[in-house]
Amino acid sequence: MKIIIRTTLAAVALILSGTASAQNSNSSYFLEGALNRHMNNPAFAPQQDYVAMPALGNINIDVSSNFALGDVFFNRDGKTVTFLHPRVTVAEALAGLKDNNEYRTDINLQLLGAGFQAFGGYNTITISSRSLAGFHVPYDLFAITKNLEDRSYDIGSADIFAHSFVELALGHSRQITEALRVGGKLKFLFGVGRAKAELENLHLSLLDNQQWTATANARVEANISGLKITEKQKEYNQTDANGNKLTYTTVDDINTDDFKGISGFGLAVDLGAEYDLSEWVDGLKASLALLDLGFINWSESHLLVNHGTPFAFNGFQNIRVKDGDGTKLSDQTDQLSDELTDLYRLEDKGDQGSNTYGIGTTLNVGVEYALPMYKQVRFGLLSSSRFQGDYSWNEERLSANYAPCDWFDMSVNGGIGTFGPCFGWMLNLHPTGFNLFLSMDRTMGKVSKEFIPLNKGTQFSMGINFPLNKARKKAL
C-alpha cells in the first residue's frame, strides 16, 4: 500500500502502475446472442438462460490514453525501460507527449452471474468487482524530470484518481407492449477504497545549481477504512537567523494493516428501454440506457494538504535510472518518486468523517437496422458518454453485426471519441451448454514483452458461460 500512495503522490510514476468503470464491451451492444449485453442496457434480455463460470463469466479490461504508451516506454537492448532511461534521448522522451496527458485503466471482473426467464420477464443476478484509476499530468511535469534547465517552470495542475468497489446487481426486464421493452437494475455497492490527489499552481524556479524554490497547492483525500498515517520531521536546505536548520513536517508512512475490507456502502440503479420502430421502418429499433445512477457513502475520509507556502527544494539533482542485471521496470522511478513526494510536503489533517461521492454515470443511445431481406445482418450506431468529472469521455461507434445461425454471431465495428479512432470486433459462440466470447473495442497493436500496449491503449473482454437452453428467436 505504501508504494501505491507514494506513486499517487508522484504523478509521473503513476504511468507505470495502471491498476483498474467499464460496464461491458460496446462491441456486444447489438449482438442478440451476447449473454452479457444486459450490462450495456438493462432492457436487453439474452436469448438463453445461463450460469456464468465463477470469475470468468465476464472479464473487461480497458486501458485508454490520449498519448501512446510507446511514447514513455522504450526498448533498449531487449529490455523495456521508461522515458527516464539515460539511453532515451530528450527528443525521444518528449516527442509524443501532449500539453495535458490523460490516462485511465478500467476493470470490471464478474465474480458470479446468472440470467433466467421468470416473473413475466428476464432476470439477472451478478456480483462484480469494479475499479477505475487514472491521471491528468501536464507536459512540463514530464519535461523537468528529463531535461532540467536553469529557468522557471509554471507547471499548472495535475490530478490522480482511483476507486474500487464490489457490486451486487439484481436486474429485471419485460415486454410492456409489442414494441416497447423496459428494464432496470438495483445495485448494492460495497466500497473497498477511494483516493484522489490534486496538485495546483505548481511553480519551480532554479536559483542556482543546488537549490530550487517551489510553491504548490496539494490535496489528497483517501477513503480507506483503518488507514494509519505517520509523519516525520525533515530539514530544509536553509537556516534561520541563528544558523539552525529549518525543519518541516511531511508524511512518512501510510499503513493499511488495520484495513477492514469494506470502506463504504452505496446504491445505484440502471434504467433502460428498447423500442421497435418497424411499424414505420421495417427492421429499425432504438434503445436508451442510463447506467450507474448512484453513490457510495465512505465511512472515513483522510485528508492530507499542502497550503502552497514557498519553500526551498533540493530534489531533481541526481535523477538516474541505472541499467543493469536484475533491474525491474517498477524500480526505475523509485528515486524520482521519492523526490516528487518530497515536493508535495503533505501534512496529515486526520480523519474528516464520512462523505459521499457518485460512481460515474454512463448514457448509451443506440439505433439498429436489420436488412429486411436478410435479417441475420444488422447495422448499429451507438453513442456512449461517461459522466465522471475530469474522467468523463464519449464515443460514437458504427457496427456491422452478423448472426448466420442460432449459436454464433459476430461484430466488426469502428469508433471515434475522446481517445481517438479505434477498430473493434467480437466473436460469440453460444450453443446449448457452452458460451465463449472474445472482443476488443480497441484492437491492441504493438505490445512490450511485459504485455504493455504501446499504442493509445486497448479494451479487451472475454468470458465463459453455460447456456441452459437453445437460443430463443425472440427474448421473452
Image (cartoon, grey):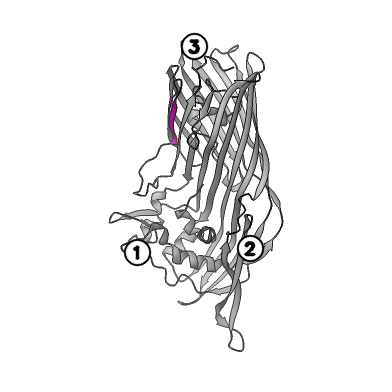
Residue assigned mark 3: 372
In the figure, residue 94 lies in which quadrant? Answer: bottom left
C-alpha separation, residue under disc 2 versus residue under disc 1: 34 Å
User: Whole-percent x and y of residue 360?
Assistant: 62, 42
In the figure, residue 275 lies in which quadrant? Answer: top right
Q: Can residue 355 be seen in this view?
A: yes
Say if mark 3 contacts mark 2, CB within 8 Å: no
C-alpha separation, residue under disc 3 versus residue under disc 2: 62 Å
User: Whole-percent x and y of residue 158?
Assistant: 56, 57
Q: Which label is found at residue 86?
A: 1
C-alpha separation, residue under disc 1 versus residue under disc 3: 62 Å
Q: Which tag, 2 or 1, sits closer to the chain's start?
A: 1
Residue assigned mark 2: 304
Q: Give the range drawn in magenta.
A: 427-448
Q: Which label is found at residue 370?
A: none
Residue at screen point 39% across, 48% down: 452
User: Whole-percent x and y of residue 421?
Assistant: 45, 37
Q: Tell me the amino acid under the disc marked 1.
A: Pro
